[in-house]
Amino acid sequence: RRCQTLADRGAMLARGLGRTRRAGTRALSSLPETPPLPLFGIGGRYATAIYTAAAKKGELEKVDTDLKAFSEALEGMPALTAFIGNPMVPRAEKAATLVACLDKMGGCTTSKNAVAVVADGGRSTDLKKVLSMFNELMVAAKGEVTAHVTTAQELDAAGQAAMSKSLDELLAKGQAVTVSYSVDPGLISGHTIEMGYKFIDYSAATQLKKLTALLGIGV
């Protein structure tokens, strides 16, 4: 039967993924019991629920390690991604396969429940987003902040240093920022900043749109 074939394939994928098990758990300082920042959308709701459940059980460090390792392994296994994204596979089979994968990797019960809930809720295709957003919560909980800066022209070393200094001024005490950069000529000049749930737009393109709207000029 087709479903049996898919289930067998899922079991094989779980066994293969089990060989990528990561050892050890990184020791972290005390983490906040409540999610450190608000996240939105379906992925945000699931990620927030996972954080809350792990915090209540005192397993944030373990769940962080489990899901980070699982996310990395998932990136290297397109067959598993295709399996959980296949609409022909029942939700229960997807959940069972994901749980088997984490079990092979030594994942804790909370981590296994997390991926099972996503699959049972029919959101397997959003799993990567959920894992990514949970990582955002953990980064913020540890006092780390990631920022992505998009500029109209590529910044040289001096420009990046100045940008990092400006971003430091937006941080709370004890936080540190890691910055990534990209270029979008469509901004005309200036830059945009994505930092956590904040989006700051200093681009000339946006200012021009606001001006034309204010003046009632068609574009």
Image (cartoon, rainbow, N blue to C red):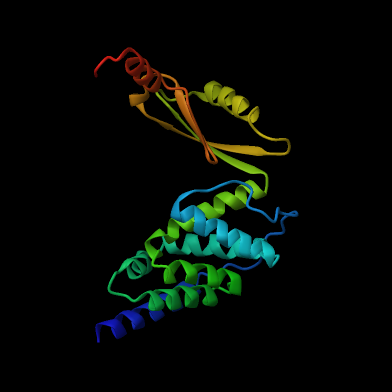
Residue 10 sits in which quadrant? bottom left
Please name whichever residue, 144 or 161, is drawn nearer the observer in this view of the structure. Answer: 144
Return the x and y of residue 52 as percentages of the image width and height.
62, 60
Q: How many marks?
A: 0
Residue 111 rendering spot, x and y as whole percentages: 57, 69
Q: Which residue is situated farthest in the right direction here? A: 30
At 58% from the left and 67% from the top, the residue drawn is: 22
Outermost residue to the top: 215
Res 166 → quadrant: top right
Location of the C terminus (image quadrant): top left
Quadrant the N terminus occupies = bottom left
x 48%, y 78%: residue: 100
Instruction: Answer with the quarter of the image where residue 23 lies.
Output: bottom right
Q: Position of residue 19 (x, y in %)?
A: 50, 74
Q: Residue at x 42, y 22 (%)?
A: 203
Q: Name the side, left or right, on which 137 lies relative to 172.
A: left
Q: Nearer the viewer, residue 125 or 102?
A: 125
Whether residue 6 is visible here, answered yes or no, is yes
Above or below for 66 versus 174: below
Tell me if residue 21 can be seen. no
Q: Residue at x 62, y 25 (%)?
A: 165
| Above-or-below relation of 82 to 1 | above
Asked if residue 205 lies left or right of residue 192, the reply is left
Place of residue 101 in the rendered image (x, y in percent of width and height, measured from the top left): 48, 74
